[in-house]
Image: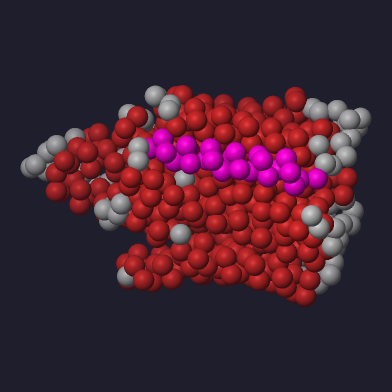
Amino acid sequence: MSTDNRRWKVLITVAAALLLITLDNSVLYTALPTLVRELGASNTQGLWIINAYPLVMAGLLLGAGTLGDRIGHRQMFLGGLVVFGAASVIAAFAPSPALLIGARGLLAVGAAAMMPATLALIRITFEDQRERNMAIAIWGSISIVGGALGPIAGGLLLAHFWWGAVFLINVPVVIAAFIAALVYTPRSTPDASRPWDLLSSLQVLVALSGLVFAIKQAAHAPPSWPSAGAALGVALIAGLLFARRQARLPYPLLDFAIFRNRAFLAGVLAAAFAMFTIGGVQLITTQRFQLVAGFSPLQAGLLVSSIALGALPSGVIGGAVLHRTGLLPLIGGGLLVALLGVLLTIFGLDASLGWMIAGLVLTGFGLGAVMSVASSAIVGNAPAQRAGMASSVEEVSYEFGSLIAVALLGSLLAVLYSAGVQLPAGAPQAARAGLAQALALADADSVTGPAIIEAASRAYDRSYLVVMYVIAGVLLMGTLATAVLLRRHGPGSESFSTGAH
């Protein structure tokens, strides 16, 4: 087999695994109402079922990347596939919310092992800079496709099977990817002299868990400020201990010096802002159209897939033109286009579904350009011996964006609804707990039911608009921050430098 054919088959193999990883991040957006109903989960448990996956993955990614440098990225990829496949089976047959949350955490362990390996294997396999940019652009596009296909796959499977099918669909892909990886992926040279630091990984996980818990407690109705403050304190202490430990280690899990490179830092921020937007828009839009507009899970999934429709062409184009345009037009410009798309989506909510779809497509078009080159900005601005670390940082930025989107925006939507709903006289106060609960109570009350549905739907729409404006504000901050960082970064300057460009 020729070397040319082999390297593209490596790309196909890691792309298949990446598709599963990103699909599992969003597959529950449309399935969540069904899961909550059939498992008897609370609103908080529902959010943890979604959040356990990006939380554990983000916490373990840094350690997984450096472990890959130590034992080999091929071995990490194969081991991650095995864990991911086993966890998928456990999740599919979970009898309770608690066990499903645990299974989602185990899924994240497998995903964390695979994710840095996918990008590191591309970095090792593709030696030509332009080919590598194209391969990473395809990799980034697969991330978008997986995230966008998640809601569609969830809706399609729920239309024909029980909810566990959204996890069982992973198994045949895992088996095929495992066989292909054995045949095609290269054996990297492991560096056994470098120690693997489990304690640092645990410090990151504790810091992120504390942050997410603090957000959820602060956004609870009513807010639990003592719990939020305590969780935030734990997060800060764990974060400071992590930073202090990295400064003292001869082989740190994260070398903060790589953030001195402006292009690297811009890529990290761009990836986080992009996933925050995609995760947030998908989560709240699928919920809104199922609960308020009466869409089926499949219809809601197809609606938010408009993001992928816009992202695919710009994702491929971005990787192809990066060497000519440089990073600024694609990252700063892409975030600005996404901001305009979110504003158009907000306008479309009152205008027509067509305008809303156009807004989602425009949002995806901007984010496709961002995600296609954010990975190149990160990996291309790190030294080859830090390929695993750079890949881990890149993945942490994506997962952190998705994690904060679900934790912050999901909680914000719930608290805004609870605070703003004006229930009719005689309506049960339990309808304030959430729109799903309000609809269930309305079905059981033929007298006040229609008034409850109208009041709850109106409050939910107001909350939805506020959250969408929050997303727009975050995109504006991302546009300004990356524009400042990349203002001196021109075409052809994507190689590693220890200083700022």
Q: Indicate yes or no whether the magenta region holds residue 81.
A: no
Side of 267 where 472 appears, left or right = left
The answer to whether any part of residue 488 appears in the image is: no
In terms of secondary structure, what is the magenta stretch mainly? helix
Residue 251 x %, y %: 88, 34
Quarter occupied by residue 236: top right
Seen from this angle, which residue lies furthest front? 1
Q: Residue at x 88, y 39 (%)?
A: 189
Span highlighted in magenta in the image: 163-186
Residue 78 x %, y %: 70, 36
Side of 421 where 319 appears, left or right = right
Q: Residue at x 39, y 45 (%)?
A: 157
Closer to the camera in the image, 112 or 84 = 84
User: If the image is split into quadrants, where does the C terminus sit?
Assistant: bottom right
Does 304 sit above or below residue 222? Answer: below
Side of 30 where 230 appears, left or right = right
Seen from this angle, which residue lies furthest bottom? 324
Closer to the camera in the image, 291 or 310 = 310
How many numbered marks have been drawn onto this rendered protein structure? 0
User: If the image is split into quadrants, where does the N terminus sit?
Assistant: bottom right
Q: Residue at x 18, y 45 (%)?
A: 452
The answer to whether any part of residue 132 appears in the image is: yes
Q: Residue at x 27, y 46 (%)?
A: 421
Quarter occupied by residue 349: bottom left
Does 14 sit above or below residue 441? Answer: below
Does 282 sit above or below residue 443? Answer: below
Residue 117 x %, y %: 73, 43
Side of 172 where 115 appears, left or right = right
Residue 147 x %, y %: 53, 52
Does 49 sit above or below residue 323? Answer: above
